[in-house]
Image (cartoon, rainbow, N blue to C red):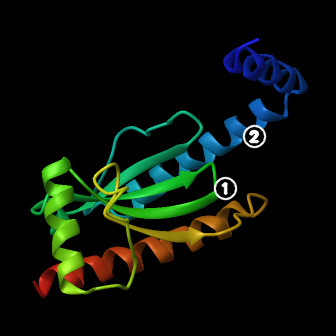
Amino acid sequence: MGALHESMLEYKKQLKKGAIQQAYKGLIEYIMGLRTYFQKKYPEYFVSGSIYYGYMDMTYFALVPSSLKKHRLKIAVVFNYETFRFEVWLSGANRQVLEKYWTLIKESGWNKYRLVPQEEKWVDSILEHVLVEDPDFSEPDSLTTQIEKATLKFTRDVENFLSRQ
């Protein structure tokens, strides 16, 4: 049997239990609510109209403050399935934008946040930062507050960095 076939048999077995569907549905509903929360609370930000659902590797939505829009940069609020945590990423409109700002940050020596290593760069992000290491979904309001505060701090720090360049 091939690896895909074996994986599909395991996937089928796990799906029959029902917990995966329940957890995935709850996670997606939470992220949709989080996106709506940012849309309503921060009308000065462009909040993407859609969510990237991924392949159970990451699910995210983007925020674009006007200060970053002119640079063609965006903030992504990401749920990373592998590490099972929420992260925030600085990303760009395309590879040229990613490369430009990756190089700018690298050459400046600014190291407040994790600069994506060169071998990984220009895939999805320039900078990455953990928002919530071990999210507690039993307290969604508290989780939202944690994500909000850390996302805003990350955004302000990036804005301040860019204003000094």
Other-residue count near label 2 (Cα within 10 Å), few / some / many at <14 / 14–19 / ≥20: few
Name which residue lies at 37% across and 65% down.
116
Name which residue lies at 37% across and 55% down.
120
Q: Nearer the viewer, residue 118 or 9?
A: 118
Q: Where residue 35 sits: x, y (%)? A: 46, 51
Please say if the residues under marks 1 and 2 sit with CB atoms less than 8 Å apart: no
Circle 1 is placed at which residue position?
84
Name which residue lies at 61% across and 69% down.
132
Camera-side mark, 1 or 2? 1
Circle 2 is placed at which residue position?
23
Q: To which quarter of the image does residue 40 belong?
A: bottom left
Pick the quarter of the image with the N terminus.
Answer: top right
Q: Where residue 149 sits: x, y (%)? A: 49, 77
Q: Is residue 20 above or below residue 135?
A: above
Q: Nearer the viewer, residue 31 or 90?
A: 90
Q: To which quarter of the image does residue 22 belong?
A: top right
Q: Where residue 58 sits: x, y (%)? A: 53, 45
Q: To which quarter of the image does residue 85 belong?
A: bottom right
Tell which residue pokes out farthest to the right in this image.
17
Q: Is residue 153 above or below residue 88?
A: below
Q: Where residue 61 sits: x, y (%)? A: 41, 48
- Secondary element type, mark 1: loop
Q: What residue type is disc 1 on?
A: Phe
Other-residue count near label 1 (Cα within 10 Å), few / some / many at <14 / 14–19 / ≥20: some
Q: What residue type is disc 2 on?
A: Ala
- Secondary element type, mark 2: helix
Point out the tag, 1 or 2, that comes first from the N-terminus.
Answer: 2
Query: In the image, 145: left or right of 66?
Result: right
